[in-house]
Image (cartoon, helix red, strand yellow):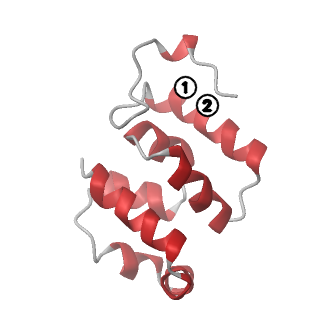
Amino acid sequence: MSLYQVSKIIYQLNRDAALARRFKDTPGEVVSDFDITPEERDALLKPDIGLLYVLGVNGQLLMHYAALWGIEWTDYLQRMRDGVKQHGPVRAGIYAMTTSPDEVVVK
């Protein structure tokens, strides 16, 4: 997994309006510039907020990425919860889980 590269893509999309516009037009082309796994690529392109969260993407980056896609705050939070249920505990990053997914409460 290349958490750094996924985070870098999202960070740059959040900071660079021209890149965000390019991403909206040709998302596959933008993500192909980074060394990421097929799972990460699919999660970015869907966008699968829940999987990106489980992969370890920082919530501060992820919430702005969700906004880029027009995802409302409550839906964003639910997608994170659903991601843990569907994909298991957070795998890496500062949110790596030490509890079971059944014990998780995301507010």
Above or below, 13 relative to 88: below
- Give residue 11's position: percent from left, percent from top: 44, 65
For residue 85, the mark is 1
Return the residue nearer the eye: 28 or 20: 20
Q: Name the image quarter holding the C terminus.
A: top right
Residue 88: name its quadrant.
Answer: top left
The amino acid type of the residue labelled 2 equals Arg
Q: On screen, 31 above or below 7?
A: below
Q: Residue 78 placed where, x, y %?
A: 69, 37
Q: Amino acid at mark 1?
A: Lys
User: Please, is residue 20 above or below residue 46 in the view?
Assistant: below
How far across and how far down the image is residue 40, in percent?
36, 54
Residue 48 appearing in the image: no
Element type at marker 1? Answer: helix
Q: Check disc 2 and report the residue beneath it.
A: 81
Q: Identify the residue at image location x=59%, y=37%.
A: 80
Q: How crowded is the residue under tag 1: few (<14 C-alpha within 10 Å), some, or many (20+)?
A: some
| Residue depicted at 54% across the width and 25% down the height | 85
Residue 55 left/right relative to 75: left
Q: Are marks 1 and 2 in contact (CB under 8 Å)?
A: yes
| Left or right: where 105 falls relative to 12 | right
